[in-house]
Amino acid sequence: MSLAQFLADLDALVERAQTTFNSADSAEALEAARVEFLGAKNGQLKSAQQGLGKVDKADKPTAGKRFNEVKGLVESAFEAAQENLSGAGEAASEAFDVTLPGKPVRIGRLHPITQTIREMKDIMGRLGFTAVEGPEIEDDWHNFEALNIPLSHPARDPLDNFYLGTANSAAAESDSPLLLRSQTSTVQIRVMENTKPPVRIISLGRVYRPDTADATHYPMFLQIEGLLVDKGVTMADLKSVLRLFFVSYFGGGEDMHVRFRPSFFPFTEPSVEVDMNWTDAAGNTGWMEMGGAGMVDPNVLRAVGYDPEEVTGFAFGLGVERICMRQHGITDIRDLYQNDVRFLSQF
Ligand code: PHE
């Protein structure tokens, strides 16, 4: 074979090898191309090497040198193709579009009732009232007896309370029935039984009454109970503390009206009901009862071992949901307990 022919064949081989390697678009295609050109047995480079033996002896150094160059070229063409291929794979798996908008993080929020509870504790805390807790399952001493509600009182009727333990409410007549507390005033007794005056506490928690749910009633609701007992406490202290509470909570704007209406509770004397101006779902305006209050009845002070000649006190119990509703313009208490995120996310 002539030198010229041999060199021409080598040039053609390099070109074919480069084209084939470059166009290999998968690891399998590249491997096939490698075998085709660099294969130790029948690779094209191998055949070209065999052609070297047929070149004239005088031309062998030139032909050999060129063969080695070509071998290097084919090998580096293969390596380049191999690098390209794996690099492309990496790039494809790592690629991301930095201009894409981020995924919005869904941030939770506090339930409006929780917000109200915290705000109430905060305000009353600044007025020097410590928050305490009491059990939701009560005995009849704490829910009634010590609160000056005798057995004959209609408030103890089995139809008005969730008595526990029997199928037919007979527990209400047994010696010591248990019930879901109907009011947080129970905590007044529990605190006074264990503390000497002065006392200055609030208690926030659930109470239970078999009421039919409507826009302003629910069989479970929350109350904030307040109790202050000390020497010389008067009704004026009760009114000013409640007024301060309402002004702090609602901001005391011109559209806020609070009314104290004479009323009756067995455990306070005198007693008032506390009303606020209110707008219902239909847009009607009027008064809404927010809770009850009064001067602690001497019988209650005696029941816990206090001397009514020594100390006097006031107590109040307000509906937490109604205060929350009044703040936000919520007109149906049931909305607070449906857990509809569309509703809750507004607050
Ligand atoms: N416990 C009363 C109620 O639930 C409210 C109240 C509390 C009244 C304290 C007077 C004093 O209706």
Image: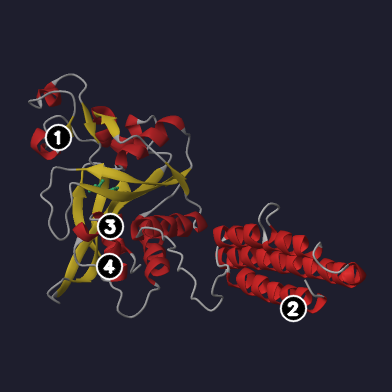
The tag earlier along the polypeptide, 1 or 3, is 1
Residue annotated with mark 3: 321
How far, Cα to Cα, is label 4 from label 2?
97 Å
The tag earlier along the polypeptide, 1 or 4, is 1
- Residue 63 drawn at (x, y percent): 85, 71
- Up/down of 6 relative to 306, above or below: below
Name the amino acid type tagged 2: Ala
Residue at the far top: name it.
175
- Residue 206 drawn at (x, y percent): 29, 44
Q: Quadrant of residue 37?
A: bottom right
How far, Cα to Cα, is label 2 from label 1?
114 Å
Residue annotated with mark 1: 156
Q: Nearer the viewer, residue 177 or 211?
A: 211
The disc placed on residue 324 is none
Q: Residues within 10 Å of mark 1 (few under 14, many from 20)?
A: many
Q: Nearer the viewer, residue 115 or 127?
A: 115
The disc placed on residue 8 is 2
